[in-house]
Image (spheres, helix red, strand yellow):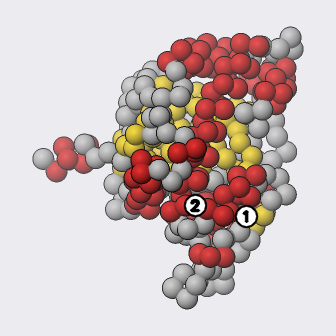
Amino acid sequence: MEAEEKQQLQIPKIDLRGLDRTQSGSQLWDSIRSEVMAAMEMYGCFEAVFDRVSEELKEALFGKAMVDLFGLPLETKQSNSSAKPYLGYIGQIPGMDYESLRVEDAPNFESIEKFARLLWPTGNPSFCNTLCAYAKHLQELEQMIEKMVLQSMGLEKHYISHIESLQYGVRLSQYGVPLDQETKIAMQPHLDPNMITIICQHQVGGLEVQTKDGEWIHVQPSPNSFTVVIGEAFAVLTNGRLQPCLHRVRPTSNCKRYSVLFSSRPRDGCIVETLQELVDEQHPLLYKPCNYVDYLRFRFSGEGQKAKDTLKAFCGVAGEETEA
């Protein structure tokens, strides 16, 4: 009976249909904002019901654009390179049947065109139109959530400057059959280094998030919902008031699995630092200001991989660092 109850655990599902930032301050907005903040504090994530992305757009993305993308030769996909770790092609990892590509500045049509021309010399207008439309809708959702969180903390005055400091991107991922058939794990437990990630699973589930009690919750794919996950940069911004969500991938079937991750990260050159209003005697400063790209380099270095808590090892204040 206990095992059955654990299987039925779900992260909060919050209905954001018909809501946008222009309704800030309305009774409906304030009610939903309270739900969002409670979910972020308790789980570091929630399931957002958001109907701006039509079924037709999802089918164009998952049924056409991603199939075309991952059908390209390996050397073509690997041309999606970046001097910064984590921001280009990822794949060919021993023990994993996984690969993904990242489109930086994805809501910007010119950036998507540049990405497409890298892979398809004559361009791919259909791919560009599909991805741009999708990214614009997800940017709207991400900024609405950011506004709700800052309002809930009494920090709305920082909203515009915070949003202007962010860079957005889309990571397109494909999972094959898990090579470890005993654990069925296709992606090991991890934290995202960015501000916020919005995950869309398509048909084949697999995303699992961990509760504060250490229980794993399976997130069932839904036609009109997206999983919103806090990243490490948000922990720095909020002085640890909101903690990043540990998650992993265990596909629910031995079928190919696609997922799309829309995420926000600090722009190059921007320093991530705690909002001063969140530091007081009861809440001493936990993290020193840090350069996000420098953190990425550390996080994926040999030293960073050995750290028990990579973020604190890199920028935790004196007495807060976690030993490797």
8 to 112, vertically: above or below: below
Residue 23: percent from left, percent from top:
53, 45
Is 118 on the left or on the right of 256, as rendered? Answer: right
User: Which dot, 1 or 2, sits closer to the camera?
Assistant: 2
Q: Label 1: few (<14), some or many (≥20) within 10 Å?
A: many
Locate residue 102 relative to residue 188 in the image: left or right: right
Residue tagged 1: 272
Tell whether label 2 touches label 1 (CB within 8 Å).
no
Quarter assignment of residue 57: top right
- Confirm whether residue 220 shows in the render: yes
Q: What quarter of the picture does the C terminus occupy?
A: bottom right
Disc 2 packing (10 Å; few <14; some 14–19; many ≥20):
some
Q: Name the residue under label 2.
A: 150
Q: Which residue is drawn at 77% across and 13% down?
A: 124
For the view shown, which residue lies furthest in the left direction?
1
Task: Examine the image and state in which quarter residue 274 appears.
Answer: bottom right
Using the rendered view, name the quadrant where residue 154 is placed. Answer: bottom right
Residue at the spot 71% in from the left edge and 68% down from the top edge: 273
Work out whether 144 lies above or below 251: below
Tell me where residue 101 appears, x and y as whole percent.
70, 31
